[in-house]
């Protein structure tokens, strides 16, 4: 925001090299920068730019186009890195993709800007580059491990390939994204991928679970509050928007937000400003908002439960996450991944799936989607007594049978026809025994929250001083 930029000092002028094969674009950028007081040199190709760099060591900033005949912008950046040229490099392109953005930044590019851009954006980009140079670190390259930090999106099915291609186009932009999909499909994972693959990756990724908060608390969580704003406000609080400044804010299950708060959110999206609860001071914020929902927002709008103007503001780029039943070929790989993850978390040997077990998993409809599969793989890892998971181990959990799993480490007796809630209690007790009453590890192994586990234990009649409560963390 302009207010924040005014607080940051930058050199009055810098020496900028503009490399672009399009005459009009090149001259336009040069004119803008000269009017801002910078010295500017121009080149029509990367090879010409390298020649200039070889003879002129005074350059502070290099702006290069991506698509150029001969040597591309990426190749140009790699050459700059090889020659250890100490100048900040920014890529200017109309062909945005996460692949080019990440690759350019891995090789030392300072930033990445997409055409068309306005005068302020270009001036700000160069000013930031000059401030970076003024700190004494001429090159501000991204660590080579950046790509490995992208959230793992497992699957080679056609729906997953299409999803990844779409996300790679969307990620480098700053546009608001609306993620839709059934519960358990991995909407938060998609949001984290968008953040990690964006130019905001160095900023914070902040989430807010809308159903978990009352309307009053949600407003405070979003915007923060001043001391004395309400009865329990004994200190000022920073809100999620402020925490996510220059980063990404995920509003999970956005349909749970009441209409009054929807109006306030709309204002932030439109004006990029907000006020803390109990304050009249307007604050600026630079946040990319990603919203998610498992409901049909058009139906919510038609029913009057969601503002139409907010819907259109959020759905600039809609992303639909496919349910697991539409990507059945990904199930075996996902299952083995979750088995390995559970084994590492529980410090146990990794189990393998038998061929019949894989067939059974692939045939299941997965109403709970990826989350259901992950929880099942954790459960069978907890209960496994052999290195291989068989179809018999899985069948009771997938078909809704009440027969005890063959691999369960629960006392063996005739339980045919036993109620499911009794089965649940025995599974919880067996898992508690395995982890010596450690509720945190037990809840994680069962795929539930500690609070849910504690409530179930209270319902079973456990007292707070019981051994199962004694090691709560």
Image (tube, helix red, strand yellow):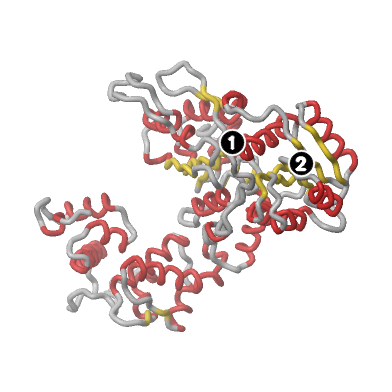
**Percent position of residue 354, x then y:** 43, 83
Say which residue appears at 48% left-offset and 67% top-offset.
365
In-front residue for pair 379/38: 38
Above or below, 44 relative to 388? above
Tell whether 124 sits left or right of 322. Answer: right
Q: Residues within 10 Å of mark 2 (few under 14, many from 20)?
A: few
Residue 211, image x, y percentages: 40, 40
Q: How many marks?
A: 2
At a point 71% along the width and 40% down the height, the residue shown is 60
The N terminus appears in which quarter of the rendering?
top right
Q: Residue at x 22, y 52 (%)?
A: 454
For disc 1, the marked residue is 311
Horizontal side of residue 112 vs 314, given as left or right = right
Residue extending furthest toward the top: 280
Mark 1 touching mark 2, by CB under 8 A?
A: no
> Which of the pair 129/361 is nearer the observer?
129
| Residue 350 drawn above or below residue 24 | below
* Res. 27 image quadrant: top right
Q: Which mark is residue 202?
A: none
Point out residue 383 in the picture as x, y percentages from the top left corner.
Answer: 28, 73
> In this rendering, would 12 be left or right of 393?
right
Q: Secondary structure at mark 1?
A: helix
> Label 2 belongs to which residue?
115
């Amino acid at each position: 925001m302009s207010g924040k930029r005014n607080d940051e000092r930058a050199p009055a002028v810098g020496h900028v090299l503009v490399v672009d094969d399009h005459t009009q674009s090149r001259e336009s950028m040069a004119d803008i920068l000269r009017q801002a007081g910078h010295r500017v040199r121009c080149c029509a190709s990367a090879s010409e730019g390298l020649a200039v760099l070889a003879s002129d060591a005074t350059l502070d900033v290099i702006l290069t186009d991506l698509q150029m005949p001969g040597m591309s912008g990426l190749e140009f950046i790699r050459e700059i890195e090889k020659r250890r040229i100490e100048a900040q490099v920014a890529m200017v392109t109309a062909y945005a993709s996460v692949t080019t953005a990440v690759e350019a930044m891995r090789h030392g590019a300072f930033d990445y800007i997409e055409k068309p851009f306005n005068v302020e954006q270009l001036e700000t980009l160069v000013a930031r580059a000059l401030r970076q140079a003024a700190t004494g670190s001429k090159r501000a390259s991204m660590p080579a491990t950046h790509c490995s930090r992208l959230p793992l999106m497992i699957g080679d099915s056609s729906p997953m390939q299409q999803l990844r291609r779409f996300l790679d186009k969307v990620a480098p932009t700053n546009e608001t994204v609306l993620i839709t999909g059934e519960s358990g499909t991995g909407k938060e994972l998609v949001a984290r991928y968008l953040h990690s693959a964006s130019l905001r990756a160095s900023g914070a990724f902040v989430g807010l679970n809308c159903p978990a908060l009352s309307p009053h608390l949600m407003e405070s969580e979003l915007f923060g509050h001043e001391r004395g704003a309400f009865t329990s406000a004994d200190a000022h609080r920073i809100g999620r928007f402020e925490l996510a400044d220059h980063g990404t804010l995920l509003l999970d299950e956005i349909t749970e937000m009441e209409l009054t708060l929807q109006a306030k959110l709309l204002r932030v999206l439109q004006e990029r400003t907000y006020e803390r609860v109990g304050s009249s001071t307007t604050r600026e914020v630079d946040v990319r908002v990603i919203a998610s929902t498992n409901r049909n927002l058009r139906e919510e709008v038609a029913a009057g439960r969601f503002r139409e103007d907010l819907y259109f503001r959020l759905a600039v780029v809609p992303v639909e996450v496919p349910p697991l039943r539409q990507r059945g070929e990904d199930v075996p790989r996902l299952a083995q991944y979750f088995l390995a993850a559970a084994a590492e978390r529980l410090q146990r040997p990794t189990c393998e799936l038998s061929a019949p077990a894989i067939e059974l998993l692939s045939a299941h409809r997965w109403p709970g989607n990826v989350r259901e599969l992950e929880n099942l793989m954790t459960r069978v890892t907890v209960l496994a007594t052999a290195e291989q998971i068989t179809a018999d181990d899985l069948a009771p959990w997938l078909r809704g049978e009440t027969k005890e799993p063959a691999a369960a480490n629960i006392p063996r007796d005739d339980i045919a026809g036993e109620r499911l809630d009794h089965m649940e209690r025995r599974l919880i007790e067996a898992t508690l025994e395995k982890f010596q009453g450690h509720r945190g590890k037990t809840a994680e192994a069962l795929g539930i929250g500690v609070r849910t586990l504690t409530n179930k234990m209270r319902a079973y009649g456990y007292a707070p001083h019981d051994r199962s409560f004694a090691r709560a963390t």
